[in-house]
Amino acid sequence: MSIRAVDLFAGIGGFHAVGEALGLETIYACDVDPQCRSVYQKNWSLDPAGDIQSEVNDNKIMVPRHDILFAGFPCQPFSKSGSQRGMEEARGTLFFNIAKVLEARRPRLVVLENVRNLWSSRHQGDWETIIAILRSLNYRVADTPLVTSPHRIPPELGGTPQIRERVYINATYVPPSLQGQFGLVADSITREEAGQTWNPQEWSLQRFLPSLQGSAANELELDQREIEWLDVWEDFLNLFTRRAKKLPGFPLWFDVWTGQLEIESEMPEWKQRFIQQNINFYNENKFEIDSWKDAHRNLENFPTSRRKFEWQAGDLDSIWMGLIQFRPSGIRVKPANYIPAAVAMNQTSIYGPKKRRISVGELARLQGFPDWFSFEDQKASSSYKQLGNGIAIASAYHSVRAHIRRDEHLLSSQRRRDIVELEIRAPDSPFTNLEKSPQDR
């Protein structure tokens, strides 16, 4: 008999991929976004249900009986990019729908994923509420979460060059008959136990990204205006590298150097600090900055966010050797070894040596999706958003394996040795069992 999984808040099926890699049968999925459901169905041959709140209520639980529950429940209430209202926000209360499913179905394993910020002082009350609810339903769970990222997992274990720190909550059901033997406070899973043993500085995007050709590459290339923005800041960088000077790590603001932006008492402290740092930097480097300003008078016509520059690329000699982001807060350049976390907003990373953006297919691979995974004719902006909202498959995969190893004795005591065998038979990398699509097996 197969081990059955359900995939709540399923998105495009990151947890389904984890289930496929482990040899599970995913029997149910649910997501409110119709575009996500369409992509999910095309790739996994399973048609997800819609809004979980219509699937779960006091009168009925449409989620079928299952052995393992996966849920990347909505992160916006806890994300640094959101309002951070936690459980007070409507989406935050969606966790309680998970609790209703657990109360009705009692799956043996529960794997929940959310943003790193959930485990923070600001959301300590939310965290304690989640853990208390799980334990009230007889789930054994650690006081502290597993925090994992694919860029710290070795490539042979399925790791990828993307920094994406996420919290995993790994809970195991304890039947009443075993509660005298097994308490509800589990040991924390360490990063090492979940495969976090790789030095991320050893990644190289050049070796990871394929060489795109033809129209696909052309669509990703920077336009002339974007190249102009970067070439102007490249000249700025060269002024300092030729004099063996290093740029500071704080954001550089052109508007401060022209007097358009000054410190005002009502400004937040962080903004006052950055402005003062820029004033000091200008006074120390007035000759270089003024000569650069005189040579690039067009910079005054750049969008506000393109008149800001943040150099985080250390000893690189050129912007075009780094990884570039056009952010609302300015232009940021980092070393081109791994990319920042993909986000749902339009901040697609630019690979400097190729002067082009990371493609949808490349970002899917960075999230751990197999090469055959397809978005078909969907708009690229929708695909980037879906990937930005998704999970990193290698992180989830190794969290489950470490989870099963931690609770092997509890599972065996429940006569669920079949779940223990999942971990024993599991390949080192999730990619091993994802080489073929479900349709081709």
Image (cartoon, rainbow, N blue to C red):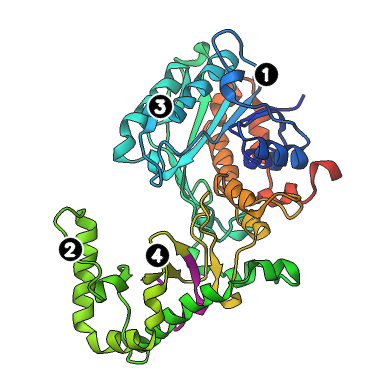
Q: Residue furthest right?
A: 440
The quarter in which the C terminus is drawn is top right
Q: Specify whether residue 309 is in view.
A: no
**Residue 30 counted in the magenta span:** no
Measure the alpha-carbon separation of dots 1 and 2.
59 Å
At label 4, which amino acid type do we have?
Ser
Label 2 or label 4, whichever comes before in sequence order: 2
Which of discs 3 and 4 lies nearer the camera? The answer is: 4
Residue 155: which quarter of the image? bottom right
Residue at mark 2: 263
**Mark 2 or mark 3, earlier in chain:** 3
Asked whether the residues under the numbered discs 1 and 4 touch, taking CB atoms below 8 Å apart as contact, a structural biologist would say: no
Q: Closer to the camera: disc 1 or disc 2?
A: 2
Vertical arrangement, residue 205 with respect to residue 80, above or below: below
Query: Label 4's element?
Result: helix
Residue occupied by mark 4: 305
* Extreme residue in the left direction: 265
**Location of residue 75 in the rendering, given as x and y in whole percent from the top left corner:** 47, 38
C-alpha distance separating marks 2 and 4 = 18 Å
Q: Are marks 1 and 3 in contact (CB under 8 Å)?
A: no
User: Which residues fall within the magenta stretch?
Assistant: 312-325
Q: Which residue is mark 3?
A: 131
Label 1, on which residue? 64
Mark 2 is on which residue type? Ile
